[in-house]
Image (spheres, coloured by chain):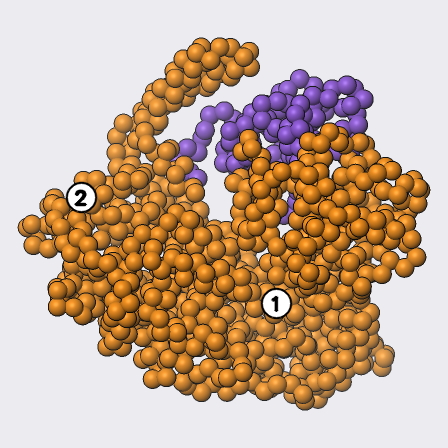
Chain colours: A orange, B purple
Amino acid sequence: MRLYLTEGNPHCLKVVAAVELTGTRCELQFVGVEERVVPFLSHSKLPCLQLDSGNYLFSTNAICQYLFTLRGKEPSDLTNQWLEWEATELQTALSGALYTAVVQGKKEEAAGTLQKKWTYIDQSLTRRSFPYLAADAITVADIVLWGALYPLLSDSAFLLGDLKALRGWFERVCAVAACRKAVESILKGKGLQGLKPYLQKQPAPSQRAETPTSNEPEGGESADRVLTEEEIRAAADSWSKGLSGWPKPKLIQHPVLPQPNEKNVLITSALPYVNNVPHLGNIIGCVLSADVFARFCRLRNWSTLFVCGTDEYGTATETKALEEGLSPQQICDKYHAVHAQIYQWFGISFDHFGRTTTQRQREISQDIFRRLLERDFLLQDTVEQLRCESCQKFLADRFVEGFCPFCNYEEARGDQCDKCGKLINATELKNPQCKICKGTPVVKSSKHLFLDLPKLESRLVKWLEDSMVSGNWTPNARFIARSWIRDGLKPRCITRDLKWGIPVPLEEFKDKVFYVWFDAPIGYLSITANYTDQWERWWKNPEQVQLYNFMAKDNVPFHSVVFPCSLLGAEDNYTLVNHLIATEYLNYEDGKFSKSRGVGVFGDMAKETGIPADIWRFYLLFIRPEGQDSSFSWSDLLLKNNSELLNNLGNFINRAGMFVCKFFEGRVPEMELHDDDKRLLAQATWELRQYLQLLEKVRIRDALKCILNISRHGNQYIQANEPWKRIKGTDADRKRAGTVTGVAVNVACLLSVMLQPYMPSVSASIQEQLLAPAQCNVLADEFVCILPGGHKIGTVSPLFQKLETDEVESWRKRFGGQQPEEGSADQSKTEAKPTAEAKAAAPVAEDAGKGADPQRAKQLAEEVTKQGEVVRELKAQKAEKAVIGAEVTKLLELKKQLVLAEGKTAEAPAQKGKKKK
Amino acid sequence: MGLTTIAIHLVQEAQQNQLLGRTAEEKAIVQQWLEYRVTQIDGHRGKDETRTILKDLNQYLEDKVYLAGDNFTLADILVYYGLHPIMTELSVQEKEKYVNVSRWFNHIQHYPGIRQHLHPVVVLKNRLYTSGH
């Protein structure tokens, strides 16, 4: 059997100790923190034990017990009880305490939350008067609890005071050789701090707040976090400092360049391909996510450069040019402008939005190419390629279409299948067809250059491991990169028989250009070079620059494997990606966005709805596909706008401002803080810190929730203190109303700063309404009084508008299926339910409907059910295999007929299975 | 004290030890799913986590009759009880999405003496949404 472990993972301690103590022979394998080993679990669960039968044990306690059972040590009621208590009660308390102690560095606070657990164990030990938890000798219960407690109890901050029995027990178990070995192999002598990298990768415990399953009232981790006195005092102290000691926002002067001894952040978002209008999924996947992060970095006063541009070379441009009857360059000019406009409307704050068809691009690509050639990282080979004799050209990639060799999708392109997403060699396509003349191409050979990835593999792997350990790679990025390497790297062709591209600077290859994937990522460099001559200070400066790449997950292989190999092989001290941030996919109302079918909202149409760009930004960021696919839904957009923006955030900010105007003639009243006010300050500070931590890890969607939490607290605060009533009361009441109003309007001001990365125009209008000083636009981990007593504010007006159901319904119809210009004749047929429409139009099979026979289908369905019963019956009776087999065959045959009768091809279900990886 | 501890004790009392697993491996797997029941299923918060649980279980059950493989065990009983409120809430479409869970669940609820006072959850046998995801 094989045990999978991670260094610095506290859960590994007990398992290793159990292996050592029982003397079990098993192979230990260390893997990365977020590695998914257990195939059926969607999240990484480590440690885990793979048994010889192939089964997995992912529960640490089950693993420990199993190892003991193998040695003949069966569980008893008492050991079972300890193990269950550990899993249900202790672990929830511990995970919160570990997070507080290690990640937030507040050990005392963490120790406080665990007192009750300590006492419970101590009392149990005292009552039974065993030296160990369940018997006179060591049992599985001791190992399990020891492993859970060791990280905290071994730290000097966690004194056990007069809990003698617990202390004695802990020391006894610590002395066991197996336990000492476990500590050594998992913590490597680093103590509590050794857990930090692991814990930082886990979700913050506030997000897994427990609903107490026991009757014991638990302190700590409920939705309303209990604030300590210390936190409240500290928040009040910070507040009173005001803006006097506050850092000044850095003035942005172009060109932005990295500064020595400062944090320098270089942000790229995947270059959108020029031949199409981006849809909402493209926008959230890269540019919008990168924009939020870039704005955040600027608010933290880091030197930040955010570049992007259109990717313009390649066959897709050429085919599009043919379609529209323009030259490739004209197509690029046209769509580059379309892209630039859309991003501008969405408020994307590029420092430079360039393109790949520039002189710089040619220079840098050819330079990297030459360096690779000189260093012998390029191979030459002849390739079988499809050639259309009537058009007299080799049909690269998108010039040819055919049936996908993997899933049989009939419109697969020569480089990739849109349906199953697999990369294809054009010659593998079934029934290939020239896209231009629809003729059948023939296979011819042509000479090409290849990047020798296998030769670069060892360098790549070393760099990749370092980058993944020190940087923030999203789990999907780690997974995809690792699986590419695991599947083995092969040489990749970097040249193409085309005209529209960067010429290969070799006489022998003068009719060829670079394959787009080779030069497209070089676009990041050339676009920067078009922004500043000093581009190398960003791109050949890995010591000072942190590089963040934003993209959707389909782009991960190129950014994590292929492009880094080009740069590593060129040996020119290039800045390689430190943080690879990949999103999952955004679906449209449970289907896919599809330009050809007109399903979904595309960049240019968002504007036409009249919904402000910031609302789009908010909703897209709120549903950002972080961790798993998510869906855009019109009704959800309405709900989020009306509940979160209008009723929560907008309501709070508006009320705070209105009170200042109405009750205090537009001047912020003097404030005298009571406990209630300080408590709100502490809550806001805590959320602010969460927000900073999350954004630093590029958890954009989670950080947005912190903003909404603050305004939620703010609303409760106003509601509880009722300044509108107190203003009419005694002097003391009026004073109180003033304090509450003043604190609230300052919280509103803090929100405007935190909101800036997400909703820049809303943020600006809040600050305009409050006449907030520009100096407040810096993010630090303290909340100070920005608008002191006497500060004059401007005119307050509502920030958000209500969205009405019928309004949203009409857009849903409009964007649901056919576009108006395409379906003009049968406008009335436009489906009310876009999902149904999308599904009906989904490219399941061309002949869908032809063979459909509902009557027959119904009959067959019944027969399938009956036959299914027969098989089940036989299995239950443990009938002979041959008998069952015969019935199963019948069942399968019936199912096949049913599928046909329903009007699908027989392969349809199989495709679906494959698609779900 | 503790649901699984008590249940295990009762099983032993009733001399039905096969419900706790026949081999060391099966015993471990039973224990693992019992723990899963009291930590994950009972501790689930919100739709997202419920979905993860169903998705994981669905994957796991793809090639299994019972949680521990080929034999009916205590794990099936307790996980069944844990999932009952969740399954009751599922739409027909969702039940089809988690087809392996539904198949297993239906099987367990018809196992003699298991369902007790709980109402049966209807699981359709014909797929209605064959073209959806």
Q: Which residue is identified by label 2?
A: A432
Question: Given the image, on which type of amino acid does mark 2 rest?
Answer: Pro
Inspect the image, locate mark 1, and give the three-letter code of the amino acid beneath it.
Answer: Gln
Vertical order, A533 against A181 (above or below): below
Across and down, in percent, residue A710 comes to 66, 67
Dot 1: chain letter:
A
Q: Considering depth in this image, is A261 or A400 the residue closer to the camera? A: A261
> Which residue bears the numbered disc 1?
A693
Q: Is residue A309 above or below residue A907?
A: below
Q: Residues within 10 Å of mark 1 (few under 14, many from 20)?
A: some
For label 2, count other residues whose C-alpha is less than 10 Å away and answer few (under 14), some (14-19) or many (20+): many
Quadrant where the C terminus of chain A is found in the figure: top left
For disc 2, the chain is A
Determine the image quadrant of residue A41: top right
Q: Secondary structure at mark 2?
A: strand
- Mark 1–mark 2 distance (CA, rounded to whole Å): 52 Å
Query: Is B107 on the left-hand or right-hand side of A556?
Result: right
Identify the residue shown where x is 19% and y is 67%.
A504
Circle 1 SS class: helix
Q: Position of residue B66 (x, y in %)?
A: 59, 26
Tell me: A2 left or right of A209. left
Q: Position of residue A251 (x, y in %)?
A: 50, 87
Whether callout 1 and callout 2 share a subunit is answered yes
Residue A593's x, y, as percent? 37, 52
Is residue A282 among the parts visible in the rendering? no
- Among the two numbered marks 1 and 2 on one chain, the one whose residue lies closer to the N terminus: 2
Q: Nearer the viewer, residue A459 or A283?
A: A459
Tell me what residue is drawn at x 53 percent, y 61 percent.
A469
